[in-house]
Amino acid sequence: MKCDEAKIQAEIVKAYQAAGVFVFSVPNEAAAGNAVRQGQLITMGLKPGVSDLVAFIPGRGVTFIEVKTPTGKQSPAQTRFEERCKDFGAEYHLVRSVDDAMALI
């Protein structure tokens, strides 16, 4: 995750927690650059493209949230994950700011 995206994500988590929303991150980049660890995590269920955040939003239920900068673009894996969410009827949102994320609640 790029530094700017990480900053936006941290601000979203802080705002959601202050609003009483249960939110957690999916650290898909945790093994970047370490092929052995990445292989272990894939065996344990790591899926490329999974959203940055998962939030339990009152009235919406479980919501998958991808965080991007104002000019950021989804990777092909992220686009596939978004499509999979929609195929299963799950909420998925791409947000570019705290305001975008707060509009969901």
Image (cartoon, rainbow, N blue to C red):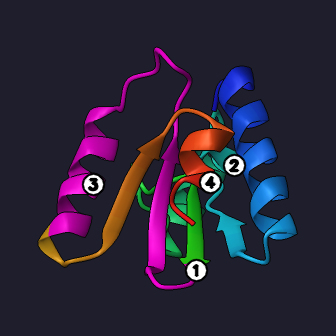
SS class, disc 1: strand
User: Which residue lies under the disc numbered 3?
Assistant: 82
User: Which residue lies under the disc numbered 2?
Assistant: 30
In three-dimensional space, the C-alpha distance between marks 3 and 4, rounded to whole angstroms, equals 20 Å
Start-end of magenta stretch: 57-86
Between discs 2 and 4, the one toward the N terminus: 2
Residue 18 marker: none
Q: Is residue 32 left or right of residue 3?
A: left
The image quadrant that residue 64 belongs to is: bottom left
In three-dimensional space, the C-alpha distance between marks 2 and 4, rounded to whole angstroms, equals 26 Å
87 relative to 98, above or below: below
| Disc 2 crowd, CA 10 A, few/some/many (<14, 14-19, 20+) | few
In three-dimensional space, the C-alpha distance between marks 1 and 3, rounded to whole angstroms, equals 17 Å
Q: Foreground mark, 1 or 3?
A: 1
36 relative to 2, above or below: below
Q: Foreground mark, 1 or 4?
A: 4
39 relative to 6, above or below: below
In three-dimensional space, the C-alpha distance between marks 2 and 1, rounded to whole angstroms, equals 23 Å
Between discs 1 and 4, the one toward the N terminus: 1
Say whether residue 81 is magenta.
yes
Residue 3's x, y, as percent?
74, 23
Q: Is residue 94 left or right of residue 77?
A: right
**Residue type, numbered disc 4:** Met
User: Which residue lies under the disc numbered 1?
Assistant: 56
Q: State the residue in front, 90 or 59.
A: 59
Q: Foreground mark, 2 or 3?
A: 3
Residue 49's x, y, as percent?
39, 49
**Residue type, numbered disc 3:** Glu
User: Which residue lies under the disc numbered 4?
Assistant: 102
The image quadrant that residue 24 belongs to is: bottom right
**Residue type, numbered disc 2:** Ala
Image quadrant containing the N terminus: top right
